[in-house]
Image (cartoon, helix red, strand yellow):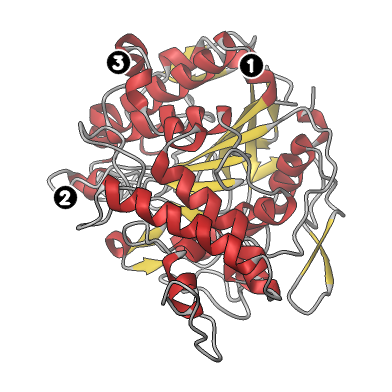
Amino acid sequence: MLRILGESATLCDRLTRREWLRIGGIGLGGLTLERLLQLRAAASETSSAGPARAVIVLFNTGGMPQHETWDPKPDAPAEVRGDFGTIATRTPGLRVGELMPKTAELTERIAVVRSMVTGDNAHSTSGYQMLTGVPHVPLNRENAGPGKPNDWPSYNALVRALRPPRGGLPSSIALPRRLANNNGQDPWPGTDAGFLGRALDPWLLECDPSAEDFAVPGAAFPDGLSPLRFDRRRSLLSQLNQHLDHLQRSAAVEQLDPYKQQALELLAGGQARQAFDLRQEPDTLRDQYGRTKYGQTVLLARRLVESGVSLVQVHWASADKSKPNGGGWDTHEKHSESLKGWLMPVMDQVYSTLLTDLEQRGLLDQTLVCWVAEFGHTPRLNRRAGRDHWGRVFSIALAGGGIRGGVVLGQTDRLAGEPLSDAVRPADYLATVFHCLGYAPETLVHDPQGRPLPISRGQVLEPLLA
């Protein structure tokens, strides 16, 4: 809530100047105007001409198993290859896990990286590296929290620094839940703006787009605020602007105006609010994505990039305590049961539908889609028929804007446990993402002290580029 310190001068309608300004801080549910929409005034859009207008990141929290997806080892011992076979794809010579039949039909649009390396086996610290491109100090520190010395900004925050909001929406959004351990109690480092400051924190929406009553998260009218009262507040804001025309306004007040307008647009309608209205989509398409929380969140991500959001990061949404491993990808036990029962069927359906949907709309060449996680899984199954954390090598996939499909980069050993060639670091992956958006790795952002810093210290993965 904006508060102006100093003398409480009464205006002609008996409201103090402070009261007028507090009217402008209409709360959006549990998220305030400043928290959602404020961008630092010094941040400006850098000219970019990359092939990708936007990026959708499917961040599969818990770790994606390379053996059952992009890097199967059918000739390895049973405790390594697992319980599933392989299938051919549209790419000659490329075979993937048998639980990916729909994705296998689309590999001519997909570039696979089999040699991603973080060297870190902890969710939060390996995740920090995948979100920032910078190794955590120290490695392998589970339940690590944000803060110095591990306060490099996430790529979500860097996008906010590089690109201003459009159409009443911020340039970067993460949803539908936090990246955190212990069911959301401990946020990971690298999920915020770090040393760039809170004003550039990614906009996090905790929501369930599959719910029947789903609406703009945080933008419903607060209790006690009727549409009539809302209209009256808008009228007061209009009067406030007139009153302040003849006042010498501080920089903070000047910066507030566009953010205030964005908040009002979410409440009153317009392009931003419509982006969240999944009822505008045909039922057949919603069914193709699947009526799960994850499926409808990915559909919402597509709508958000259509509405001008530059980067949408979708976190794996399952949190079902009745299932092994809480229904997620952290499959320390009953690995095969989890993959076949609910993980891979949903992932294969949602990922393939997203790529097909974007292509049919003419958007795939303008939208980079990233299938990633914080790490992979161990080469050998453990005693609980599960796979544990493994950051020494794992697979990711890129498709769409600026990426050449039908490409496989990197090779692993016979156990898919170590890279044999073309080891790729998270900094290289993120440098490639920024390249596709039109920003060279040496593009500079400035911290609050004005010091210039490059957005990435990685190398663009040239073999993946179209």
Amino acid at the residue labelled 3: Asp
Residue contact at pointers 3 and 1, CB within 8 angstroms: no
Residue contact at pointers 2 and 3, CB within 8 angstroms: no
Q: Which residue lies most toward the bottom here? A: 7
Q: CA distance from mark 1 to mark 2?
A: 36 Å
Residue under label 2:
321
Relative height, residue 306 to residue 39 (above, below): above
* Residue 211, image x, y percentages: 22, 35
Quadrant including the N terminus = bottom left
If you read the primary sequence from the N terminus, does the residue marked by circle 3 or circle 1 appear first?
A: 1
In the rendered structure, find residue 109 and report the number of the disc placed on it: 1
In the rendered structure, find residue 287 and report the number of the disc placed on it: 3
Secondary structure under tag 2 reads loop
Q: CA distance from mark 2 to mark 3?
A: 25 Å
Relative to 425, 268 lies left or right: left
Q: Residue at x 70, y 73 (%)?
A: 251
Relative height, residue 429 to residue 199 (above, below): above
**The quarter of the displayed image where residue 143 is located:** bottom left
Q: Residue at x 43, y 30 (%)?
A: 274
Amino acid at the residue labelled 1: Arg
Task: Decide if residue 41 is in sight here.
Answer: yes
Instruction: Bin the neighbour count of mark 3 within 10 Å (Cα to Cα): few under 14, some 14-19, many 20 and up.
Output: few
Front residue (pair 223, 145) = 223
Tag nearer the camera, 2 or 3 = 3
